[in-house]
Amino acid sequence: MTDNIRIPRMRTIKETAELFDLPVHFVRQKVNDGEIVAVRAGRRFLVNIDRFAEYLDSNTIPQESKADSGIQPIALR
């Protein structure tokens, strides 16, 4: 058989956080929210680190508009 099966690189949440120099709670929150690819193996979650890297590369923080940032004046009655 010459089929090239690509096995994903999987790491625990803690290992993923250490690899990407991120807080463990950040990675755990993304797993719990379903934002990143992870599978449950017993009591642990295994994160697909290739997909996690793609998530970090593609996920950008939107710029705040002037109306959404800072202190807003309110009308007095």
Image (tube, rainbow, N blue to C red):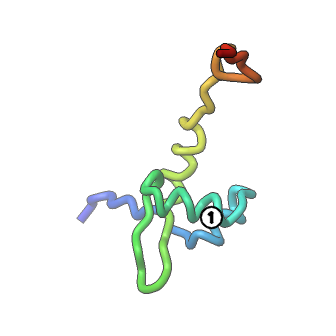
- Observer-nearest residue: 14 or 54? 14
What residue is shown at x 33% (from left), y 60% (from top)?
A: 5
Q: Residue furthest left?
A: 1
30 sits to left or right of 1: right
Residue 43: x and y, percent? Answer: 47, 84
Split into 4 quadrants, where in the image is the N terminus? bottom left
Can you say whether 37 is above or below 63 in the image?
A: below
Q: Amino acid at mark 1?
A: Thr
- Classify residue 74 by image quadrant: top right
Residue 19 vertical placement versus 69 (above, below): below
- 43 vs 15, nearest the viewer: 43
Give left or right: position of 34 versus 63: left
* Residue that carries the numbered disc 1 in the rendered image: 16
Looking at the image, which residue is at 42% across and 80% down?
A: 41
User: Judging from the image, what secondary structure is the residue with disc 1 in?
Assistant: helix
Q: Can you say which quadrant of the picture contains the C terminus?
A: top right
